[in-house]
Image (tube, grey):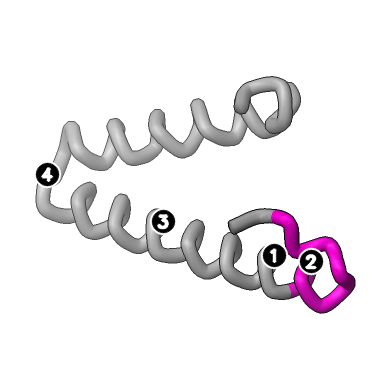
Amino acid sequence: MLDKLGLSGIAGVVVLFGGIGLVAWQNLILAAGLALVVGGLGLIVYGLVTSLLASFGMGGMP
């Protein structure tokens, strides 16, 4: 999976987890809410990309 992300993707994941960790250091409930929002956005983007690839005939991903 790491080879598909590339260097900028790995840096983005590190910054994301660092930001959630920084918020969790101050307020644990707020950090949990932010993590849920980010996870939900990730699922939405995954669904959109999968649908777009399927419309182009490249829907090989389950």
Q: What residue sits right under mark 3 in the picture?
A: 38
Task: Name the residue at the right extreme.
Answer: 56
Tell me if mark 3 has few (under 14), some (14-19) or many (20+) residues whose alpha carbon lies within 10 angstroms of its own.
some
Looking at the image, tell me whether mark 1 or mark 3 is earlier in sequence order: 3
Task: Give the quarter of the figure containing the C terminus.
Answer: bottom right
- In this picture, residue 23 sits left or right of residue 49: left
Residue at (46% x, 38% y) in the render: 16
Numbered badge on residue 53: 2
SS type, badge 2: helix
- In this picture, residue 33 sits left or right of residue 14: left
x and y, in percent, of residue 9 in the image:
66, 33
Q: Amino acid at mark 4?
A: Leu
Numbered badge on residue 49: 1
Tell me if mark 2 has few (under 14), some (14-19) or many (20+) residues whose alpha carbon lies within 10 angstroms of its own.
some
Q: Amino acid at mark 2?
A: Leu
**Is there a contact, CB below 8 Å, between mark 4 and mark 2?**
no
| Residue 11 is inside the magenta segment | no
Q: Amino acid at mark 1?
A: Val
Mark 4 and mark 2: span between their CA atoms? Answer: 37 Å
Residue at (61% x, 27% y) in the render: 1
In this view, the residue in front, 6 or 11, is 6
Q: What residue sits right under mark 4 in the picture?
A: 28
Mark 1 and mark 4: span between their CA atoms? Answer: 32 Å
Tell me if mark 1 has few (under 14), some (14-19) or many (20+) residues whose alpha carbon lies within 10 angstroms of its own.
few
**Is there a contact, CB below 8 Å, between mark 1 and mark 2?**
yes
